[in-house]
Image: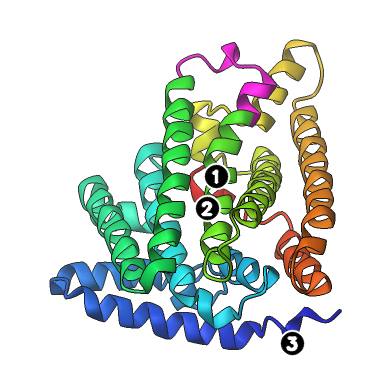
Amino acid sequence: MDVRATLPLPAIAEATGVALEAALVASAWPPRLMTDARTVLAHPERLLGGRLTPWVLFPIAACVAVGGDWRAAIPAAVACELLGAAADLFDDVEDGDPSDDLLRLGPALCTQLAASLLALMARSLAASGLSGARAEQVLWRGLLYAAGGQYRDLTASDDPAALSLEDCLEIARLKSGALAAACMTAGAVRATDDPALHEAVWAFGERLGLYHQLINDARDAHAAAPKADRRRGAPTLALAAAGRAAADGHAPEVGAAVCYAYALAERARADLLIAALAPRCPAPAVAAACLGLLLRHEDGDGAAGGTAT
């Protein structure tokens, strides 16, 4: 089926952008904080910069998949966009990526701005009723898992060779998988009170986030200009596999191939979860189309990966 009738992407982007602007105005932040927040949120890869981000699509598509109207998930979409921007700022500081924000603001202000965006995330959901409070709890659950994964990532860099490929996979699942799962479930709770459906959506979101992260890591392993992950020896599956391949006398490009293989396996598992979840939704064809869209959306763009890599 043509999912565009159920998910009118231009209207979703416009409505979420308006709601995000309203949340910023309601924050009553000092002028400098407001200016810096708008600058970050208006990057070309973010919603206010003109891109319909995965952060927005995750809750919207999940809400519609389980029987809701996309408009009901707008508060969750705003919260997820704020979460995504905050996660990217934290990531820049921790990895030392020479991003425009880090160069312009410095580590201290980047960290404070990220914390401010998370505070606004919580406030924007608290103002949207009981389902908003549930969505907030779900997002904090995802952040709890992602924080643990990120801490393990940063400490594992002390001795990356000690990690198995499964260890690297688990770190990616905790970081990117948990955030994608949380954003999707935050949309689902806006449409249904069924906890079994919530957990099914979470399981799919976890696979979805991991799939996109692995594709992103495989591409980064081939990048001409090394990213922070390569410079600090981050425990990504692609880099770990490349190190093992080189130790065995194989070309390091084998690492990216291994990572792609793992990614395709995660995508296959996600497809199986769609097949199991869709029949439990009020409109199975709509559910399958919405969830399938998330697998195809900018396929391999690291849709959830930009989350906490």
Label 3: how many Cα within 10 Å (few below 14, some 14–19, many 20+): few
Label 2: how many Cα within 10 Å (few below 14, some 14–19, many 20+): many
Q: Is residue 255 above or below residue 76?
A: above
First to last magenta residue range? 158-169
Where does the image place residue 308, in percent across and percent down from the top left? 48, 45
Q: Is residue 29 above or below residue 92?
A: below
Location of mark 2 (residue): 182
Could you say which is closer to the camera, residue 199 or residue 17? 199
Q: Residue at x 19, y 67 (%)?
A: 33
Number of marks in the image?
A: 3
Picture quarter containing residue 265?
A: top right
Q: Check contact, mark 2 vs mark 1: CB within 8 A.
A: yes
Q: Secondary structure at mark 1?
A: helix
- For the residues labelled 3 and 2, the Cα–Cα distance comes to 25 Å
Where does the image place residue 71, in percent across and percent down from the top left? 54, 82
Q: Is residue 190 above or below residue 300?
A: below
Query: Which numbered dot is residue 178?
Result: 1
Query: Which numbered dot is residue 5?
Result: 3
